[in-house]
Image (cartoon, rainbow, N blue to C red):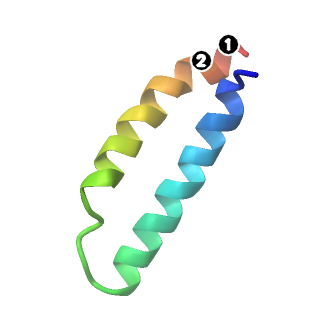
Amino acid sequence: MHRPSRQHQHLLEKIARKEGRAKAKNRKPGTRLKQWKKWAEAYKALAAQA
């Protein structure tokens, strides 16, 4: 089953977790975060339609 709204929400949670950990340890978030943000932006339109 394809659920873009659920996938979008999950990505947003992952991004928030990753940014929180990076901030707590005074580090850069990393390269995966950039990719997750790109995917979240792509899913935003799909999640709005569903």
Disc 2 marks a residue whose amino acid type is Leu
Identity of the residue drawn at 52% across and 66% down: 17
The percent coordinates of residue 50 (x first, y second) are 73, 16
Mark 1: secondary structure: helix
The percent coordinates of residue 6 (x first, y second) are 71, 36
Q: Nearer the viewer, residue 35 or 44?
A: 35
Inter-mark Cα distance, 1 to 2: 5 Å
For label 2, the crowd category at 10 Å Cα-Cα, with few meaning under 14, some 14 to 19 and many 20 or more, is some
Give left or right: position of 50 versus 46: right
Q: Is residue 28 above or below residue 24?
A: above
Q: Based on the displayed image, in which of its 4 quarters is residue 21 positioned?
A: bottom left
Where, quadrant-wise, is the N terminus in this rendering?
top right
Give left or right: position of 33 versus 15: left
Q: Is residue 8 above or below residue 47?
A: below
Please give the label number shown on residue 37: none
Q: Based on the displayed image, in which of its 4 quarters is residue 39 positioned?
A: top left
Give left or right: position of 31 versus 24: left
Residue found at the far bottom of this picture: 25
Asked if labels 2 and 1 touch by Cβ distance under 8 angstroms, the answer is yes
User: What residue is pinned by disc 2?
Assistant: 46
Mark 2: secondary structure: helix
Disc 1 marks a residue whose amino acid type is Gln
The percent coordinates of residue 19 (x first, y second) are 41, 66
Please give the label number shown on residue 49: 1
Q: Please tell me how many numbered marks the rendered image carries.
A: 2
Identity of the residue drawn at 35% across and 53% down: 33
Give left or right: position of 16 versus 46: left
Residue found at the far top of this picture: 49
Q: Is residue 19 above or below residue 27?
A: above
The percent coordinates of residue 24 (x first, y second) are 40, 85
